[in-house]
Amino acid sequence: MTRRVLLAECKQEVSTFNPHLSRTDDFGIRTGHAFLDYHRTVRNEVGGALSILESDPSIELVPAYSAFFITSGGTLAQADWEIIARDFLDGLRQAIATGPIDGVYFCMHGAMCAENEFDPEGYLLEQTRAILGERVPIVVSLDLHGIATRKMFRHSDAIVAYHTYPHVDFFETGMRAARLLQAVMNGRAQPVTARVVVPALVRGDELITETGLFGNCIQQAKKIENGPRGLSAGMFIGNPFTDVPELATFSFVVTDNDEELARCAAVDIANQFWSYHDRMQVPLISLGEMQGTLMKTPRDGTTALVDAADATSSGASGDSNAVLKALCECGYTGRTLVPLVDQPAADVAMQAGVGAEVNVSLGGTLDPSRFQPLQVRARVRSLSDGLFRSESFGELWNSGPTAVLEFGSFTIVVGSRAVNLYDRSFFYANGQDPKRFDAVVVKSPHCQHHMYAAWCSRMLLIDAPGSSSANLRTLGHRRCQRPIFPLDEIRDYQPIVEIYRRDSHRSP
């Protein structure tokens, strides 16, 4: 008997503190077999799911719609969200028109937000239920930085989340989701989920799952998931920069019809996390302290200047020149590599050509309330179209027309649009090797260890302005539930369990 499995994707992570709105052209949109063909070439969640589902001769894949963010960004403009939501749901309706659907795999992020819709993923799942009905099993994969809302749990049969940070298990997460969907479709699993809210917004090295305290919680979750009644378990630590009503940290456990196990395990994981929560903040140094360290310390290797406040992978604008300005002001002469989003500067360089000297303003084009332009005269060292493959997982990235500018001891790689900076792809694609510089600005809170930490002589974590600042009290949260750590003092935390179960599964 052939069973038809529908696949769809809608992924974006936003910082609602980034004033620059995201638009549909910030997404890669694919439908039908183009959707599947692309994901067969990269090691992401959909690719992992395909590796399982395509090996099952009884399954016919029904690709619907994929909207995959090119990089994280600001809140999605309402009109653009309505286009994506319409096309996503129309894709489902068209799939249903070709025949009955027996199961659904959705690849989502969990930290999406539109101007007038604070839970886009929950909305899409709610509408999907209205279209497909209550009996079709739906399994959803999410980033552990997602905000796992009640709607998401209510309208899905089970949720699967990453187990690693920095994230290296995209492919494996998709495989886990596909296997779980198979089990539900085959009548071998009846999922019941326990969810526990932990009122904490967290950052810092203790979240690195390989070495930090958070890893203990994940190991506990994996033990449950891989146990005799476990189906899925993990933690969502949210994205502190997506200020929405349900923003928090969550533990969750999905078991095979064992509510008591799910309930007890979710509480245990939440309590373990809470015992660590006050250690999950980042010790930052000021821009002035950074200046002092660089000017007084011998240049023995490369110093990573970690400007996570402008992390494009967390939704920041990428146009911060705060660290660059501070280095210019203190007269730092070490060779320094800096990434920057600045379309007007890139356009000037493109018009002038390689080798030309240009007067340009650098920074502050997208988030002008935080960053004021820096006027420089620079030489255009190289130009590119901005298309390249990521170092980490092979995705096709697009920084738009991109220029390498040089002035003084500074090399600035200027893209027209933001790309993820959690690896070195943007630098390498434009002919720049970070290891050949005295200092490199790293606009990501955490990268895989080999990217920088393994070889840099020091990592300076800087308290710079930006819409993804780890100095959370400075951002101005106004939508999320309160009280919440570290914005408020919480004297007594008592975990409360919510149970989700769908009682209308089909017989096999």
Image (cartoon, grey):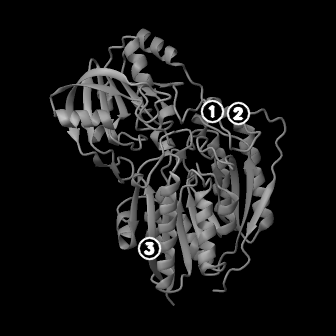
Determine whether the residue tagged by mark 2 lies in a helix, strand or loop.
loop
Q: In the rendering, at what x and y percent does residue 142 appear? A: 56, 57
Rounded to the nearest angstrom, the CA distance separating label 2 from label 1 is 8 Å
Q: Is residue 129 above or below residue 344?
A: below
Rounded to the nearest angstrom, the CA distance separating label 2 from label 3 is 42 Å
Say what amino acid the circle numbered 1 marks: Leu
Determine whether the residue tagged by mark 1 lies in a helix, strand or loop.
helix
Residue visible at 51% across and 39% down? Answer: 19
Rounded to the nearest angstrom, the CA distance separating label 1 from label 3 is 40 Å
Q: Earlier in the sequence, mark 1 or mark 3?
A: 3
Assign the C terminus to one quadrant of the image: bottom right
Q: In this view, does 211 lie above or below 112?
A: above
Residue visible at 33% across and 17% down? Answer: 334
Q: How crowded is mark 1: few (under 14 residues within 10 Å), some or many (20 or more)?
A: many
| Contact? badges 2 and 1 (CB < 8 Å) | yes
Q: Nearer the viewer, residue 450 or 446?
A: 446
Q: Is residue 296 above or below residue 342?
A: above
Q: On the rendered structure, is 387 left or right of 143?
A: left
| Res 63 label | 3
Determine whether the residue tagged by mark 3 lies in a helix, strand or loop.
strand
The residue identified by callout 1 is: 472
Residue visible at 50% across and 14% down? Answer: 288
The residue identified by callout 2 is: 486
Q: Residues within 10 Å of mark 2 (few under 14, many from 20)?
A: some
| Res 404 label | none
